[in-house]
Amino acid sequence: MRAWRLVFSVLLAVAAVSPPAGIAAESDYPAAPVKLVVPFPPGGPVDSVGRLLAHKLGEELAQPVYVDNKGGAGGAIGAQAVASSAPNGYTLLLGSTATISILPLINASVRYDPDGDFKPLAIAATGVQIFVVNAKVPAGSIQELITYTRKKKEPVTAATGGSANPFFIAMFEREAGIKFLHVPYKGTGPSLADVAAGHVEFTVADTSAVLPLLKTGQIKALGISSLQRSPLAPDIPTIAEQGFPGFEVGGWFGVFAPKDVPPAVSARLEAALAKLSRDADTNAQLQQLGLAPSWSVGEAAVRNVRKENARFRTLAGAMDLKPQ
């Protein structure tokens, strides 16, 4: 009898912590903690966005939303894990330009379809890139960097990390008619650190990572990749105003579910994310991370993601980039 009681107790405990299944999962969602996969290591700017959205979304859902950092392969490992997970709303993805729009175009090992394997629930924010050089590089503008690159006997070194960063640098090379020596890194942090130390001359990085280093005087900002100057760094001229009209690169961050998430679950998540889009504290914290709150939820998010995917496919074709 004691044995049966023990088995029954174990079954009750498992049921208490396991996500409900079938119709119950849809009607009672969420009845258990929700996992938000961040496909990059902890500590970076992407992780900070994920932790903010997880915390705020958990408050709206009245269930904990916890971050699971699943880095590797430029974000492909974490994204693939979500694409192949059970579509019950208990595993979500912090998606971005890098993992959704760009990585499938340049990494032949990516096995997910950015248009078909995910359900975009919301795009929360966008960020811009700042083009920077080590303080000792004799260039104070984009045009001076181009001149320096063309005149220097040895190739100018460019730190590239992740998947979006090399793509953005390749876009600039094509527009400027120059070529850098790409030095690969695992992420923004190490690449910026080596530019600041003078081991590499040039890189492109997001605002939140660059602005603190600018204050140290170890790096110089040459241009920002938005069409208008950023209110976070109004003294940095755009690349567009330095001889490249229309030049714009940047990234977005959002919340995605596996493609077959039930409509009732999707609607619950979208309603919670729509409330976040109107939350002043959430948007203020996004701005503190160097991002612009740029919310689109539900079908608007789906349209925006598909538009971005198509745009980058066109750019990759123009640059003759092939998955490797």
Image (cartoon, grey):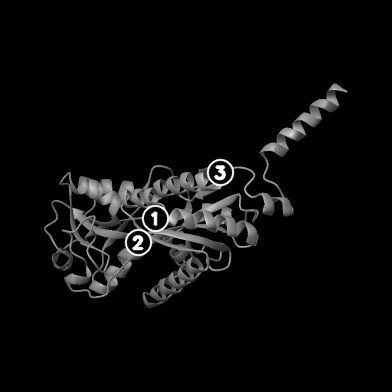
Q: Look at discs 1 and 3 and give the one toward the viewer.
A: 3
- Confirm or deny contact between disc 1 and disc 2 (CB under 8 A): yes
| Residue 222 sits in quarter | bottom left
Amino acid, disc 2: Pro
| Residues packed near mark 3 inside 10 Å, few (<14), some (14 to 19) or many (20 plus) | few
Can you identify the residue that label 3 sits on? 62
Please, is residue 64 above or below residue 103 in the view? above
Helix, strand or loop at label 1? It is loop
Could one spot residue 110 in this view of the protein?
no
Q: Which mark is residue 54?
A: none
Please give the name of the residue rendered at 30% of the width and 64% of the height, measured from the top-left corner: 169
Helix, strand or loop at label 3? It is loop
Place of residue 312 in the rendered image (x, y in percent of width and height, measured from the top left): 41, 71
Q: Which mark is residue 162?
A: 1
How far apart in space, not on screen, are marks 1 and 2 (Cα)?
7 Å
**248 lies left or right of 13:** left
Place of residue 46 in the rendered image (x, y in percent of width and height, measured from the top left): 40, 50
Q: Nearer the viewer, residue 65 or 246?
A: 65
| Residues packed near mark 2 inside 10 Å, few (<14), some (14 to 19) or many (20 plus) | many
Amino acid, disc 3: Ala
How far apart in space, not on screen, are marks 3 and 2 (Cα)?
40 Å
How far apart in space, not on screen, are marks 1 and 3 (Cα)?
34 Å
Please give the name of the residue rendered at 84% of the width and 24% of the height, measured from the top-left corner: 3
**37 lies left or right of 264:** left
Please, is residue 304 above or below residue 216 in the view? below
Q: Nearer the viewer, residue 56 or 213?
A: 56
